[in-house]
Amino acid sequence: MTITFSRRRFLTSSAGALGTMAMPYLSRAADRPAVTHGVQAGDVSVDGGVVWARTDRPAEMLVEVATSESFRDVRTLPPIAALPESDFTAKMLVENLPAGQDIFYRVRFRDLSHSAIEGEAVTGRFRTAPADRRDVSFIWGGDVAGQGWGINPDDGGMVTFSTMRKHRPDFFLHSGDTVYADGPIQPEVKLADGKIWKNLTIPEKAKVAETLDEYRAAYKYNLTDDNLRAFNAEVPVFVQWDDHEVTNNWSLSKDLPAAYKVRDISLLAARAGRAFHEMYPMRESITEPGRVYRQISYGPHLDVFVLDERSYRGPNGANHETAYGPASYFLGPEQIAWLKRGLLNSRATWKVIASDMPISLIVSDTPKGGSEAVAQGDGPVRGRELEIADILRFIKMAPISNTVWLTADVHYAAAHYYDPNKAQFQEFEPFWEFVSGPLHAGTFGPNALDNTFGPEMRFVKAPGKDSQNLPPSAGMQFFGHVKIDGASGQMTVTLRDRADVALWSTTLDPKLA
């Protein structure tokens, strides 16, 4: 089934010319600016958050906020414009909110040409970060609509988002591959058992994304899923990106496949970056517009350090350099300095490092045989591992306690415990890395582990080498759930599947500084 997005033409006469005969026509919903893809909130802090929506024409976004679902204490915020230049998206930073409070918001749009014409309101909610040491709950995962597995109504759509919503988490940490801009969605896919997977489709997803509008369409396609829109209306997102927001395994050395008529990877990345920032409720950087890495503080127990392991990396080469330089960049010097400052200054019980790629799982970049991730094989620190070694050494020497790494990318669930006594590089304190995903994509793995930092596989759930790219209907879709106990500060990490089965769990005790 093909979905098409269109907008009915509306009256273009001046507001003064709209008499009583015209107003009944304009009262119909189709003739008013609509919220086209639901609402979202994101980057929530102790006193505010960002609200996002998209409409179907030049309009003003009108936002109201309240601390009760009845909107009895409603506060109306100044309108902001949604214009063609941003594909009619708009986002607003809502500030001066009470801490630890459920916030309800309403979004509607007012036609720019006719100020008397307003669309229907769509409601959402989020919870501001606590000022005190109360319980915190959040989920994480990545990889959505990959490998051609799109929205299949016969399978319930993107079921994992419905499952995650039932946990009522404080926020969702989206670990990247939020879309597959390089992954066409075909109407049908034949499964191994002979059955047919039937995708909803849109014209723009019949090919790889190259134009700005095609990149935007990848996000709009995902937002046609009922489960995802319902989830977004209730759970704020802390989002990061990885490669598929642009194209598979992209770096500045990327050789584009023949499917691309646009041959400039930097141009594709620029268009993709603009669409990414337009389509998510992120706080924007003034010092570096378009920056993805940022720190989000969610109360006394938690600081989240959202990394960008894509924008500043060197080429996907052999990754064997023994001296640090541009060829071995993964985060890059500026981002590493920012991370060190943030970790050093953090007073939160837990410092979660949101890494869009795992540290020690080997991910190759074929056909050149280069390295896509950090790890490149057993042995001493080399290539991109130089940056990770520097960060781990800094954490030990500072000293900084209670760091946990959360990641996705490899399309299976795992838990890795890093032990310096088993490592080639030993200048670090033991720590955990937890892997989840895919949320709605093909399931792969498991990948080989590199022993440089001494990872021990404590848990893995993957299909095995003889059964790769399983569809979402196979059930092997995974997300992680983190709970921090307000009284004790203990962190419990649980890996779950889309049926909400708890596959594995561990509870970590905080070290007292």
Image (tube, rainbow, N blue to C red):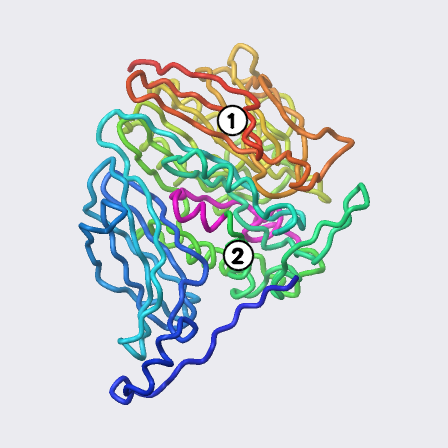
Answer left or right for 436 relative to 188.
left
- The residue under the point 55% across, 50% down is 179
Tell whether 370 sits left or right of 486: right
Q: Is residue 239 magenta?
A: yes
Dot 2 or dot 1: first in sequence order is 2
> What separation in Å lies between label 2 and label 1 (alpha carbons)?
30 Å
Residue 380 occupies quadrant = top right
Q: Position of residue 303 (x, y in %)?
A: 33, 31
Please determine whether, in this image, residue 16 is positioned above or below residue 482.
Answer: below
Q: Residue at x 48, y 47 (%)?
A: 311
| Depicted 444 relative to depicted 19: above or below | above
Q: Position of residue 345 (x, y in %)?
A: 27, 29
Magenta region, residue range: 228-255
Relative to residue 165, is residue 416 drawn left or right?
right
Q: Residues within 10 Å of mark 2 (few under 14, many from 20)?
A: some
For disc 1, the marked residue is 434
- Image mark count: 2
Tell me the kind of residue under disc 1: Phe
